[in-house]
Amino acid sequence: MLSNLVWSVADTLRGPYSESEYGSVILPFTVLRRLECVMEPHRAVMAETVKKYSGEQQRRTHLKMRTRTPDRTGLSFWTTSAFTLKKALQDPDNLAANLINYVGGFSSNLDVFKSFDFENVIRTLEARERLAQVVRHFEKIDLSPETVSNADMGDLFENLIYQFAESANDGAGQFYTPRDVVRLLVDLVYVEDKRALRDPGTVRSIYDPTVGTGGMLTVADEHLRHLNPRASTALYGQEINPRTYAICKADLLIKGQDPTNVRQGDTLVVDMFKDRRFDYVLSNPPFGTDWKAIEAAVKSEHGRGGQGRFAAGLPAVGDAAMLFLLHAASKMRDVDETGRGGKAGIVLNGSPLFNGGAGSGPSEIRGYLLENKLIEAIIALPNDMFYNTGIGTYLWILSNSKPAGREDDVRLIDATGLGSKLRKSIGSKRVEISDTNRDRIVQAFEGTQNEGDGTTVPVKVFSNSDFAYWSVTIERPLQLRFQCTVETINAVAEHKKLGQIRGLLDALEAFGDESYLNREKFNKAMSKHLGDQGISLTPAQRKTLWQTIGVHDEAADYCRVPTGKDKGAIEPDPALRDTENVPFGWGGHSKGREALRDTVQAYFDAEVKPHVDDAWIDWGKIKTGYEIPFARHFYSYEPPRPLEMIDADLERVVGEIMSLLREVES
């Protein structure tokens, strides 16, 4: 395996370097060797072009033209240095200086070695007497495009990142997405555009806001070129990690892409492509990461009068996944006059489907996506698909230009049973999606499955409003019995404020144990008694006192509002308050918001009133919520085993236990 060959230089580093430092050497040397192999056939042309033209733009334009081939886009970078790894080794006394000269001669658009702090890496290797061995190791590895394709190079980079993270205990696997997942995601966002993608002169922009080493962009680009070799792509990405940013930028440069299209920075803080929208957006944001460190920036954008990316709502600070979801939705290109818009595919865990109740940030985000008809499909993947987690994961496919007749549809696809076991696990990844199963999932997404062949993938089609509901607060009257018993007086004594009022406990004991079923009568009697005892309570203290002494009793009178505009109205009992979720369209009613009152009233009359006659709806507290209960829709009931089988198993186990006990006794 190529990654093992490259990583084997770690044997040379062992001793002067700790395991956590290996990657800081191996990654930049891998990038340098790849660049060197790509440049090798064009060294003479490169030297001529650099000598003939002085301006960066002129050099880039002419070099790209002169090195272009039918299957290569041409070089858009160069080095003014005559060194290679092999030539640098020929002068061992000046090896470090030669390498620094080599790297320093690269064109300004190739600034990736600054992100690696490569000059310092070289000097440290020299000081630890390992530089020559490392250079010899990499000089022998063939990383030419003829031997290692761009896709294979992407796999190599990401395997190295994985091993680096493993050795450093740095959350291995969070940096990249398994290729089988990427290929499925790419197929899903391309599928409805396949015909157009085969047209001559097709140009598509592809963007990854969490680009990592560029794996998604690489697969998306190669897949598009497979559909149409004459297609033109513009690849864009943003990445927060300096090492993975450097690898991605070098990789895109090799492909002939504009290096300024890869930018470093936190996507949630600053959108480096603020004024751009894209044909395709692909992303696998980190799972379960908090955004506390950037909370101020995110909330500031959320509050920009509905103009920011996060205007729809904010998730809990503990998980940034739905912020990336909103960002992806905001980056889809607008629908043009032909009806073509943008598509987005994003990998998420299960929580964005259902976390947060009605009125919460997550619910409002789901509502925004559903009400704007942006969710085209959600696909549940098998467990154990990723390198750093075995939890359930989902692909969300967003579109602002769904196919005609499916504008209001949301497809839920259960692909959890389509994983093929790997011969050897890689971290937490134990299964993959085969090419055959990938095709089956895509057919389920398209709606082109052959229902009669016995290989159908479970699919359920819903309308956007099927996931909407009203959260309805149901109140019941406050009914309290008041009696100064040992228990209630002890409760007052233990109250941190009432227990400090001098003379109150003695006064309550002297009040007697008469039972009151009317709060107003109790308050009057108690106020007079306390006054006679010389104890004066504030209105807040009097309220706290009756709340502490009062006990629910259905035989008691209703407590009523004593003052204000609602004077005389029945007070609700907070302890008996309940919430009912009423789906849009319940009971055959319309699924629109305008049907709120009729639907909720009908639900209340049928489902609540017959069981709790004195309950009522608090119309002022109704909230609209949205959740996508994926698992519930695909739940399949499995009846328990027959009692005879269970009894037989129990008898067998008891027999085994008794046999073991006899052996012990003997």
Image (tube, rainbow, N blue to C red):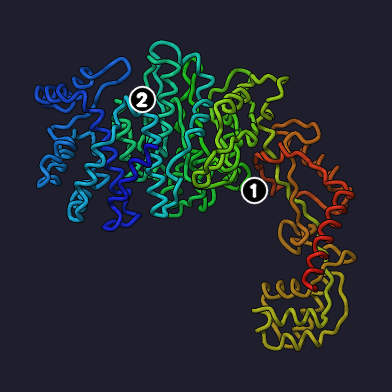
Q: Looking at the picture, which amino acid does disc 1 mark? A: Gly
Q: Looking at the picture, which amino acid does disc 2 mark? A: Ala
Which quarter of the rendered picture does the C terminus lie within?
bottom right
Question: In the rendered image of this protein, does residue 150 appear above or below residue 170?
Answer: above
Which residue is pictured at 70% across the width and 42% down the height? 470
Q: Position of residue 43 (x, y in %)?
A: 17, 25
Q: Residues within 10 Å of mark 1 (few under 14, many from 20)?
A: some
Residue nearest the observer in this picture, 607 or 232? 232
Q: Which residue is mark 2?
A: 234
Which residue is pictured at 51% across the width and 30% down the height? 185
Can residue 440 be seen by looking at this rendering? yes
Q: Which residue is mark 1?
A: 357
**Horizontal relation, residue 660 to residue 280: left or right:** right
Looking at the image, which residue sits at the far top? 200
**Residue 45 picture quarter:** top left
Can residue 238 be seen by looking at this rendering? no
Which residue is pictured at 30% across the width and 55% down the height? 14
Residue nearest the observer in this picture, 463 or 568? 463
Residue nearest the observer in this picture, 513 or 125? 125
**Horizontal relation, residue 231 to residue 429: left or right:** left
